[in-house]
Amino acid sequence: MSLAISTSLSIPFTEAVARTRAALAEQGFGVLTEIDVQATMKAKLGEEMEDYLILGACNPPLAHRALGVQRMIGLLLPCNVVVRTDPASPSRTLVEAMNPDLMVQVTGEPDLEPVAREAAAKLRAAIEKLSQS
């Protein structure tokens, strides 16, 4: 099982972030948190790195269903989506979403399978939309 559902885009980082937010919204995900990893590493460690943003994406109906099965699943929510410049090819931007199937694997809770399947389908649709645009 893959850790991420991902794509590589030939667009600037800022445009990729905007398009990622829009694609997530079309699938019912809102962005609850945003972590600018590049700025944090610079401020806290004095380290330079490529553009790197973590978006905490949440689909409330899916989160509600998952929490109804296993309250501790909140430890794995929201679904992180990373938008980052590819260090091997700075003209490319990578978008990577956490694979929700990991929730089932990590917890061993089979009742999470339908929720994870639906979340994965929605995240795949968002990522595919980015690849097609």
Image (spheres, rainbow, N blue to C red):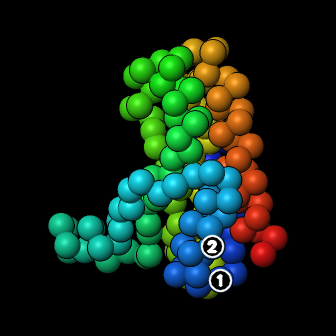
- Marks 2/1 in contact by CB < 8 Å: the verdict is yes
Residue 72 spot, x, y in % from top left? 40, 22
Q: Is residue 101 above or below residue 80?
A: above
Front residue of this view, candidates 78 and 98: 78
What is the tally of numbered marks visible in this picture?
2
Q: Is residue 1 above or below residue 98?
A: above
Residue depicted at x 56% and y 44%: 59
Q: Which residue has dot 1 on it?
A: 11
Q: Is residue 12 above or below residue 25?
A: below
Residue depicted at x 56% and y 75%: 18
Q: Which residue has dot 2 on it?
A: 19
Q: Give, as a three-letter code, the residue at label 2.
A: Arg
Q: Give, as a three-letter code, the residue at label 1.
A: Ile
Residue 8 spot, x, y in % from top left? 68, 69
71 on left or right of 57: left
Q: Marks 2 and 1: which is nearer the front?
A: 2
Would you say residue 47 is visible in this rendering?
no
Within-10-Å neighbours for mark 1: few <14, some 14–19, many 20+: some
Q: Quadrant of the N terminus?
A: top right
